[in-house]
Image (cartoon, coloured by chain):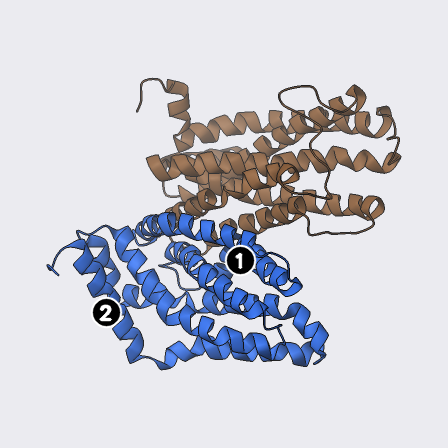
Amino acid sequence: MTPGTTTAACAALLRRDLLLAWRRRGDIAMPVLYAVIVTTLFPFALGPEPALLARIAGGVVFVTVVLAILLSLDNLFRGDIEDGSMELLMLAPQPLALLVGTKILAHWITSSVPLIVVAPVLASMLKLPVPAVPVLVVVLLLSTPLLCLLGAVLVALTAGSRRSGMLLALMLLPLCVPVVIFAAGAVAAAQEGLPWIAPVAWLGAGLVLTLVLAPLASAAALRIAMDT
Amino acid sequence: MANWVPLWLHRLGSPPVFYRFAGIVRPWALGLALVLGAAALYGGLFIAPADYQQGDAYRIIFIHVPSAWMSLFIYGVMAVAAFIGLVWRIKLAETVAMESAPIGAAFTLITLVTGSLWGKPMWGTWWTWDARLTSELVLLFIYFGIVGLYHSFEDRRQGARAAAFLVLVGAVNVPIVHFSVNWWNTLHQGSTVRLLGPSHIVASMLWPLLTMMAATKCYYIASLFGRVRADLIASEGGKAWVRDIALADDREAA
């Protein structure tokens, strides 16, 4: 790979982000532990009756994953802003949108993939019927990148400011509502034995649209927020 | 600046000129809003006939529908101002966008509350998760997010630019709210008042509705101009024109 090309830059950035995450691999476990603990709260809160748990299982697992992603989104740009690498990335000759897209990819790999791996376990803890579990995994595979991309735009807007946690939630959750509706709808349809491909197709369409637009929007938002 | 922009419009972009202009317009806008509002309420509460299905309970429409129109209209104004502020960095556009957000949020809240009050006797429920109500609630959250983001920045102009970006991102919700009754099977009724074509509503109910629409627009102008004036004084505090106004006020008081 010729150094200095866009491909080389993105590959190097991806390798760097994954290496940095691996060096703090304890942090990768945090969203997973959070999801497990929150999921186990529901049987305590609502009672262990299997019929009730099966009805809410898909929705609860999905919302828990959304919240876990929300909590881990803060780490997307914070490390780079604090040590100054973000400014170097913004000055790089490669398009910032591609570099940001690579960062989001690395973030998705380190924060969402463990959640997707553990989601079937969570779902069976909440007694989700077995035929619906593969649909849940498919839905998570499509919706977690979508949420990471949407979240990246909003995290980029709050990049400079300190107290961003609750504000990020306030901004992101209204925009996540369609994702939640389609994802939970697909799992619910699969539970009833009804066709579930339509909401999944909507999620796919949303993912493709966000994949193209969100890195551009994040790059623009970063330039606005870092422009001190 | 482009040659087709009239000079008076260009001049209005200057804070001291806009401050003076807004100060003149505001009392008239407020007065007009009160007069039109009173006329609309009188027409809606006393003159318009009772609905054949809903009786007199439908009369909340004269608050609910104009508020709903305003919640979307203000977002549209905010989006245009945000776009101008982001592209051309005109300070007044950023100020207009940021000061419109709380007004829009208030109208959205009024829409949701009056809708809820109307829904209880008519639909039997205070709330339902149908497309129109849910998307209007999402609009309220987006308004709150814009206000929150703007106030979380220390640098006022940087905060305005970030919040302006969020305004544009959230603008996708406005057509969703408007077309939700066409695209989905909703409990909320479809549109009866049309911009292009005949409206499916009797004239005696239509004119108070349109008068109240004009009244709320005048109120929005009055409220916005008042807020923008206050914001300009606050943000331009060190400038000579603000000092002159403060000194003039002191001299009047003395």
Using a 10 Å C-alpha cutoff, classify the residue at mark 2 as few (fewer than 14 neighbours), some (14 to 19) or many (20 or more): some
In the rendered structure, the answer to whether residue B153 lies left or right of residue B123 reads left
Q: Is residue A70 left or right of residue B184?
A: left
Q: Position of residue B143 (x, y in %)?
A: 55, 47
Compared with A78, B156 (above or below) is above
Q: Chain of mark 2?
A: A
Viewer can see residue B246: no
- What colour is chain B? brown
The residue identified by callout 2 is A16
Report the amino acid beneath label 2.
Arg
Q: Chain of mark 1?
A: A
Binning the other alpha carbons within 10 Å of mark 1 as few (below 14), some (14 to 19) or many (20 upward) gives many
Quarter holding the N terminus of chain A is bottom left
**Labels 2 and 1: the sequence-earlier one:** 2
SS at circle 2: helix
Is residue B238 shown to the viewer in this render?
A: yes
Q: Secondary structure at mark 1?
A: helix
Q: Are marks 2 and 1 on the same chain?
A: yes
User: Which numbered mark, 2 or 1, is in the foreground of this view?
Assistant: 2
Nearer-the-camera pick, A90 or A55: A55
Residue A196 lies, with reference to residue B14, above or below; the image says below
Question: Looking at the image, which is closer to me, B244 or B174?
Answer: B174
User: What residue do we see at 86% from left, 36% from top?
Assistant: B54
* Chain in blue in the render: A
- In the rendering, which numbered label is found on residue B72? none
Q: Position of residue A58 (x, y in %)?
A: 60, 67
Quadrant in which residue B35 is drawn: top right
Q: Residue at x 45, y 45 (%)?
A: B169
Q: Which residue is mark 1?
A: A173
